[in-house]
Amino acid sequence: MGSLLQVNNLKTGFHTEDGMQTVITGIDFEVNHGEIVGLVGESGSGKSVTSLSIMQLLHDTPGEIIDGEIIYKGEDLLKLSEKKMRQYRGNELSMIFQEPMTSLNPVMKIGKQIIETISLHLNMSGQKAKQHAVSMLESVGIPRAKDIMNEYPHQLSGGMRQRVMIAMQISCNPSLLIADEPTTALDVTIQAQILDLLKDIQEKTNMGILMITHDLGVVAEICDRVIVMYAGRIVEQATVKEIFNNPKHPYTKGLIDSIPKIGAGLDELYSIPGAVPSPKNMPKGCKFAPRCEHVMDICNLEEPALAMENGRSSRCWLTQEQSQQEGVVGHGQ
Amino acid sequence: MMSKLQIETSTMEIPKVKSENRFLNFWRQFRKKKPALFSLYFVFLLLLTMVIGPHIVPYDPAEPNYNRLLEFPTLDHLFGTDEYGRDILSRIIVGARITLSVSVSAVLLGTVVGTVLGLVSGFFGKWVDKAIMRICDVLFAFPDLILAIGIVAILGPGVRNVIIAVAFFNIPSFARIVRGATLEVKEMLFVESARSVGASTTRIVWKHIFPETIPVIIVYFTMNVGTAILSAASLSFLGLGADPSSSDWGAMLSMSRDYIGSSFHLVFFPGLVIFLTVLAFNLLGDGLRDVLDPKTND
């Protein structure tokens, strides 16, 4: 399995009154064909900015990509013209947004919106495009697909709208689907259905999915590999099993501990104290140090590198000290 | 796996929403606004008059009758006769065509130009927006009528130039309104979602943003037609508009001002139809706004 998407040293910043603020500080990761990668982190950790950077949908925000490479199928997306990039969006790379309530145009019939995507990329006649749209709606499990084509988004429930959105985004058979918190706005019962559907589509089409979420439950459900982000950096990267069985970074541990557990005492939910630091006043050393339970002297002085070890990586002095003691020297990026 | 999933969901109950007709829905709400409804009837009556007016007039509106000069309203001449003995009712009926076509086409022209400028300004922002909005500010700074007089003075009098002049001062208000609506719609997620499937900028503006601004445009179009009738009539009254001998309502007012003391009906009836028409367009606009654009309701 070759790598489908490879992000190298991606740096994205925002224009503010005080000049450029870097919010993504050189991240590297990859998504392979047929793999579901979870991108996890709190609000403000840079997950959505990462996804918008990959799609290059930052023009409507003050954001700008400063540096780095986004290699998709061997081609650097950042070097493509806007026109070429437009042909890729929806066709090669697609994106599902968080809010199915607002991501469909309220005054356009559903059929028309799906056909719009199809006719932008696939060379299909009107009648054929319509049939394709109906079959896409059926493939995401929408009953009465033919009738739904002539309805407006407000006539559907949230789950149905997210299905429509998914149908629209996979209608041109993209190789990479970026799902930006696709289930956050939905009821829990519907969440599971949508995740099943995504997993199903992925198995059928072998597309790579980058699943952006703050919900580790979603990760456990469908992801193969997890990338944990904190303050615009990757702090840990491992397979799902490893993350849940043996989280290395205290932040990841904190995230896992914050999941409510059935059967556990219901006194209080665990939460990581504090909040993600703003780009304006980042701590000098490890960015998580102020909130970390295991903080050491070195943590406040120097930021640890993202150390690789047995195919997984973590950015913490704790693990790096251990591995150094064991004689395995962690190499930075 | 896929087929199993489909079986599961196809048994799910989705309430079948009655496929609603948007126009019917609109009409149901609009019907309740009585003043606007009557105004709509009145506007329809005016439109009908525009079409069949010349065929139903009781007298030839251009034919002088020197035996019946300045006659007060009688059963023969319901609105009386003017200084040449022409039937005022007939002249008003025939004048509807010229008066309304001037103002409607002027506002239409202003709407088209203003909408395009507003969309461009709102969507592209930055210096394009600044440039367009500063020009609009300059146009706003002139009192409407003075601006129109200035334009007519440059282009020369005549119906065509009145249309251009009135269109001109409609541009900035439409540009601003459409810009505002564009700014609002532009931030919506479905615009980003359209971009994420590879839609081009032109396509997004035309297919996704413009349709959202249509209700506001309809409302202001209706309201501005009222104002435009007044402006066109004012220009005619000042002798800068339609040919004074024509039966344009403003021109009729202009010609009859010498008789205002002795024969009030010469001024009263053209004035009354102008008043009623402007009122009807404004009330219609208000009603449309209540239904189409509830947010800006004040």
Image (tube, coloured by chain):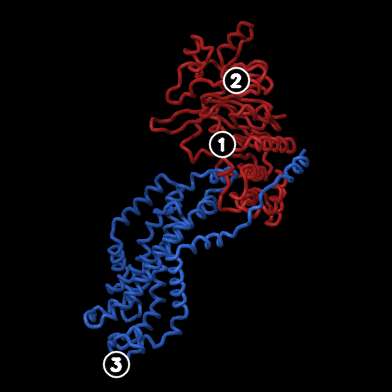
Chain colours: A red, B blue
Q: Nearer the viewer, mark 1 or mark 3?
A: 3
Question: Nearer the N terminus, badge 1 or badge 2?
Answer: 1
Q: Nearer the viewer, mark 3 or mark 2?
A: 2
The x and y percentages for residue A64 are: 49, 34
Image-quadrant location for residue B1: top right
Instruction: Say what secondary structure mark 3 lies in.
Output: loop
- Side (left or right) of B18 relative to B72: right
Alpha carbon of mark 3 to alpha carbon of mark 2: how far?
A: 102 Å
Residue plotted at (55% across, 38% down): A56
The x and y percentages for residue A133 are: 68, 50
Alpha carbon of mark 1 to alpha carbon of mark 2: how far?
A: 42 Å
Q: Nearer the viewer, mark 1 or mark 2?
A: 2
Give residue A204's mark.
Answer: none
Are the residues flagged by discs 1 and 2 from a single subunit? yes
Q: Nearer the viewer, residue A171 or A137?
A: A137
Q: Nearer the viewer, residue B73 or A13?
A: B73
Question: What residue type is disc 1 on?
Answer: Lys
Give residue A257's mark.
Answer: 2
Residue plotted at (46% across, 71% down): B41
* Outermost residue to the bottom: B67
Q: Chain of mark 1?
A: A
Give residue A79's mark.
Answer: 1
Total marks shown come to: 3
Q: Residues within 10 Å of mark 1 (few under 14, many from 20)?
A: few
Q: Chain of mark 2?
A: A
Above or below: residue A1 compared with residue B84 = above
Instruction: Say what secondary structure mark 1 lies in.
Output: helix
Circle 3 is placed at which residue position? Answer: B66
